[in-house]
Image (cartoon, rainbow, N blue to C red):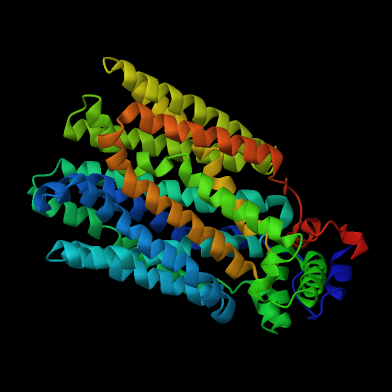
Amino acid sequence: MNRSDQQNTSPIPGMNSEGSLTFLILISAVAAIGGLLFGFDTAVISGANAYIKTQFELSSFMEGFFVSSVLIGCAVGALVAGTLSDRFGRKKTMILTAILFTIGGLGQAIAPELVTMTIFRILCGMGIGMASMLSPMYIAEVSPPNIRGRLVSLQQLAIVSGILIAYMSNSLIAHTDLVNALKWRWMLGAEVVPAVIYFILLFFVPESPRWLTQSGDSDQAFSILARIAGNKVATNEMTEIKKSLQQEKGKFSELFRPGIRMALIVGVSLAILQQFVGINTVIYYAPIIFKRTGFGAASALGATVWVGAINFLFTLVAIWLIDKIGRKALLIYGAIGMGISLFMIGLLFEMKAFGGPWILIFILVYIASFAASFGPVVWVLISEIYPNKIRGRAASTATMSNWVANFFVTLLFPVMLDALGAPISFWIFFAWCIISLIFVIIVVPETKGKSLEEIEESWMGIAPEEV
């Protein structure tokens, strides 16, 4: 089909039929900055925690509560993000997250005492919870099927970039001449800079075309889709979107109807399992783990930079592979790699084999396995598997489940270390890797290469051509 023929298929005469991959990548990258803030805010506490614990003389339980308090906000943010984004749009709700990140980061840095700091930490958590659901959902809704996995994985790349930046920032600040009472304030306050940048850039991205169609603005939706993928693809996408919306009522109760109910089970279960394999015990408490193996305080913070770097590099591997070998295969390989690593970490702690680099090596293998699988793939699946009209609220439910699971794991890990010891603590996470492997093999479907509407129809057991 030539250019003029493509233009004739457009509901808006004269619309450019070429599409722009550059434009798609740019708006996806801006949306993914929410993930960078997500990663930075969750990881920065690993460096600040030791100074805060000493200054405020926190017990193990209070340490766990303070670190995990952000996750209370995350659960609330994830819960309300779906309703807000379905009502006011994805873009406006992402702008709200940028405001929450800015206020929360600044508030933590200047808070005079622990209670006030915890309140601002919860406020930051609301931004994280909202961004963790909104960023991948927005990218999924603007992306064509053949590269959707890679583009949604930009969210996870941004998350691990934020984690790496937080680790590097913490290490640099720890080596300054600042007194300890100021070091943690600079660590927590550094978040304000990317938050303000995110806020400004969001004004230059378009609204989700699927949300616009749902809200009755089909012309604007088509215009955005055409700019991304060209008129012909946009025309086909609009037909599928409208058909999907006509079949849905947009009620939360639709999640429990036959077929779609299984999508809810898969999304929520994967969100919980992503946390129960123990990833954030390493992200939040890496310096504490390394100190137990004989690292000094500064060396422990330096070792976390290796954790962040491996996390970043193997997320790139996931982005390269996710649309090639598929979501399910990556989850299977990741569960196996994490399980072996966690079993060996527990064994090395049991044997007190701290003389060499083995625990650090297996922690890095564990991080690599997670980063190439459960890290990005779970967020991709959560953004893909729900119907258009209720995607916001459905993804919000799964994301909230993720943060609730994260809260309990983060709260209890210091207590587990003291009460059960490191070997049993890591073997518990090993057991969850086995459970995750079985669940993925038996229950999780493959969504590679399918449009969002085709995925929705597959849950109902109806071939697209039969609808």
Along the viewing direction, whichever of 241 and 274 lies nearer the viewer: 274
> As displayed, is residue 156 above or below residue 315?
below
> As displayed, is residue 296 above or below residue 48?
above
Q: In the orientation shown, which residue stands out farthest toward the front?
A: 419
Q: Residue at x 25, y 55 (%)?
A: 66
Q: Is residue 342 left or right of residue 121?
A: right
Along the viewing direction, whichever of 115 and 233 lies nearer the viewer: 115
Q: Residue at x 23, y 60 (%)?
A: 189
> As displayed, is residue 447 above or below residue 392?
above
x, y (%) of residue 225? 70, 69
Picture quadrant where residue 13 is located: bottom right
x, y (%) of residue 194? 35, 61
Q: Which residue is drawn at 57% across and 37% down?
A: 435
Along the viewing direction, whichever of 204 and 360 lies nearer the viewer: 360
> As displayed, is residue 359 above or below residue 161?
above
Picture quadrant where residue 350 is located: top left
x, y (%) of residue 47? 24, 45
x, y (%) of residue 6? 85, 68
Q: Which residue is drawn at 52% across and 54% down?
A: 155
Residue 353, visible in the rendered structure? no
Q: Is residue 459 left or right of residue 138?
A: right
